[in-house]
Amino acid sequence: MSSIKTISAAQAASYINNGDAVGFSGFTPAGSPKAIPTAIAHRAEELHAQNQEFKIGIYTGASTGDSLDGALARANAILFRTPYQSNKDLRNALNRGDAPYFDMHLSHLAQELRYGFLPRLKFAVIEVADYNENGEVVLTTGVGISPTIAGLAEYVILEHNTTHPAALRGFHDIYEPADPPARREIPVYKPSDRIGSPILKIDPKKILGVVECSQPDEVGGFTPTDQVTEQIGANVALFLAGEIKAGRIPKEFLPIQSGVGNIANAVLGSLGANPDIPPFEMFTEVIQDAVIDLMYEGNVKFASGCSLTVSNEILTKIYSDLEFFRSRIVLRPQEISNNPELARRMGLITINTALEADIFGNVNSTHVLGQKMMNGIGGSGDFTRNAYISIFTTPSTAKGGKISSFVPMVSHLDHSEHSVKVMITEHGIADLRGKSPIQRATAIIENCVDAEYKQILYDYLKLTNGAHTPQSLKSAFEMHRLFAETGSMK
């Protein structure tokens, strides 16, 4: 019988006061608490109705579900938010300036909390599949920054979500590196290596109580693939098969890191379908639907990630076949899943999505027209800079062709030309390795840009002669200006 008392979500919320910094478990909506943050939002609304201030600082692993980011944004209850988000209401709030937000590389957050660089944590709210009176907990579908916030917070509140079975024990590998100067190498040499504990140990004296909950993860369904995303996926597979044939990738292949979303799903599906790509392992942050299908087909041998960000239909399939997946999946803290040391050591092939790119290979992952935050940089920088080969994918146009994904100069820079090795769209592949700026621009325009924008970008290259990087400071953002004024870059 556990000595940890059961409390209501409203009682849990009552412990949290205006100005407190709160860390939440999970990574994407997977493993993100639901009942407690919703109750915190209700508390905020009640206090605001009484003309009392109530806002909290929010640390999470990455994005969360609507019950957390959406509810707190709508309640105007956010003092600050980091490191990543994808909720429409929160996005609108932060772009209005109502919810101060700072974007971070996901691998940095846990250590910067420990270093004391950020406001001190008062509470940690952690979703669990099981727990005992000794403070040993089994996490659910996402790990995120749970080990760090559990250790640093003054108080911990558990949310026991019974939609996740206690039999998840064994899927997690909880490991937290020492801080400098005592840090040693992280002894992971292949995706399936385990170096930590299957449970998270929390000081039971810090646990204020446990809230019972039975709400499923709020992972939205993925958009079905279409002709464009299918062709992007096919082009990625074609490129990697060519690299194997050329001997630039070992014949046994290398681990894959893939971003989240419908393009990533299409890419993974294409890799599995290409007979020249051998069965592979993944070392990534988000394990999504396509990975599970590929495991059943034998095309993915093992997946190491930070979260099971899968649809509820796929999660039900996993839970009905846990023993099959127990030897094929491991979930780690993001400080490990996104660790640059491990990405470089294992030689990850990284595949991420660009919001916008310029003709010289610089990538914008985060800002629309350089001003409006979309989601955040997430883990793409952790992987891109340290990849064996870094690939960025994007449809060549957006908004029905009114926006070109390729411009003379990105309106916001997240990944510089020095880190981006390959660009792929539905039109083709631009291999940027070993090329000068002008050569990169030519490769991108010729192979990746939509036909309606090719001449515009070729004409731009002619504006500046005799320059190493032919940028025109007068005209670099002309396509952006035209879109802002007319609704089209054409």
Image: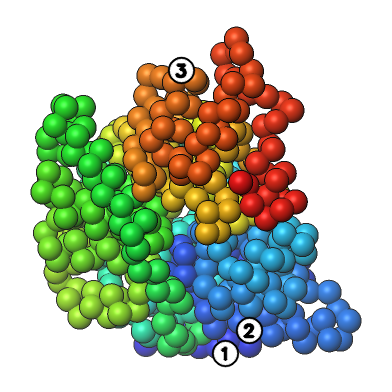
Q: Which residue is mark 1?
A: 8
Q: Residue at x 84, y 86 (%)?
A: 49
Crowding around mark 3 (Cα neighbors within 10 Å: few <14, some 14 to 19, many 20+) is few
Q: Which is more N-terminal, label 3 or label 1?
A: 1
Q: Nearer the viewer, residue 70 or 270?
A: 270
Q: Residue at x 75, y 73 (%)?
A: 76
Marks 2 and 1 sit apart, C-alpha to C-alpha, by 9 Å
Q: Are marks 2 and 1 in contact (CB under 8 Å)?
A: yes
Q: Please give the label number shown on residue 39.
A: 2
Three-letter residue code for mark 3: Ser
Q: Which residue is mark 3?
A: 436
Secondary structure of residue under mark 1: loop
Crowding around mark 1 (Cα neighbors within 10 Å: few <14, some 14 to 19, many 20+) is some
Marks 2 and 3 sit apart, C-alpha to C-alpha, by 55 Å
Query: Disc 2 or disc 1, which is closer to the eye?
Result: 2
Say left or right for 188 vs 134: left
- Which quadrant is the N terminus positioned in? bottom left
Whole-percent x, y for residue 312 in the image: 35, 79
Three-letter residue code for mark 2: Ala
Marks 1 and 3 sit apart, C-alpha to C-alpha, by 62 Å
The vertical placement of 83 against 216, above or below, is: above
Whole-percent x, y for residue 3 in the image: 45, 83
Say left or right for 130 vs 28: left
Q: Nearer the viewer, residue 148 or 133?
A: 148
The vertical placement of 18 against 273, above or below, is: below
Please indicate, yes or no, whether residue 95 appears anywhere in the rendered image: yes
Whole-percent x, y for residue 11 in the image: 63, 87
From this viewpoint, which residue is outermost toward the right?
51
Three-letter residue code for mark 1: Ser
Question: Quadrant location of residue 165?
Answer: bottom left
